[in-house]
Amino acid sequence: MTDPRPIVDPQGSRPTNVGDVVASVILLIAGGFGFALLAVLSALLAMVSDGCGPVSVCNFDLMGVGYVIALAGPPLAYLAATVWTIIRLTRRQRSWWIPIVGSAGGGAVWGVGYAMLVASIGR
């Protein structure tokens, strides 16, 4: 006698959504280009210290921390978004939104670092 219950996959895998995979990959590639441009811009932020001289008072500790945050924060956000996207894609979960959130987070981290740099020169 056959069992009338349907066979259920023990891992509960879902079918792959091709549109989600394509959108995720395109957004990750676009994010990579965006973060590469942001890395060049972050490297140029070292020139903020040119405003410091004998007349102005600058906080070099705050400047150093702000520079490191602006330089290292966005690539770390992109790396985290990439890893999280790949994990969700392998689990066949929706992941198109993760590169967008990673880009927004990386931009916010860069903005915080930039604000610290501007605050460090006392203007």
Image (spheres, helix red, strand yellow):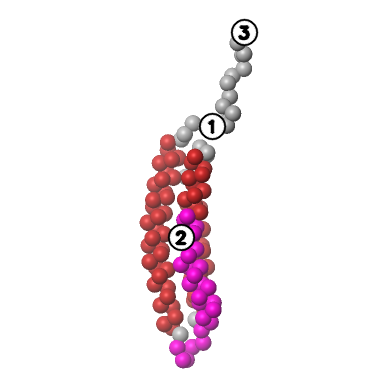
**Callout 2 environment at 10 Å: few (<14), some (14 to 19), or many (20+)?**
many
- Going by the numbered disc 3, the residue's amino acid type is Met
Q: Which residue, given by chain and number where applicable, does mark 1 sit on?
A: 13
Q: Is residue 74 magenta?
A: yes
**SS state under label 1:** loop
Discs 3/1, front? 3
Whether residues under marks 3 and 2 lie with C-beta atoms below 8 angstroms apart, the answer is no
Viewer-proximal residue among 117 and 69: 69
**SS state under label 3:** loop
**Callout 3 environment at 10 Å: few (<14), some (14 to 19), or many (20+)?**
few
Q: Which residue, given by chain and number where applicable, does mark 3 sit on?
A: 1
- Looking at the image, which residue is at 50% across and 77% down? 63
- Looking at the image, which residue is at 40% across and 55% down? 32
Magenta span dominant secondary structure: helix
- Looking at the image, which residue is at 48% across and 68% down? 70
Discs 3/2, front? 3
Q: Is residue 15 magenta?
A: no
Q: Which stretch is magenta?
A: 53-79
The image position of residue 10, as x and y in percent, is 59, 28
| Alpha-carbon span between mark 3 and mark 1 | 28 Å
Q: Is residue 122 visible?
A: no
Q: Which residue, given by chain and number where applicable, does mark 2 sit on?
A: 75
- Going by the numbered disc 2, the residue's amino acid type is Pro
| Alpha-carbon span between mark 3 and mark 2 | 60 Å
- Looking at the image, which residue is at 51% across and 37% down? 92
- Of callouts 3 and 2, the N-terminal one: 3
The image position of residue 17, as x and y in percent, is 46, 35
Q: Residue 51's quadrant in the figure?
A: bottom left
Q: In this image, 109 relative to 36: left or right?
A: right
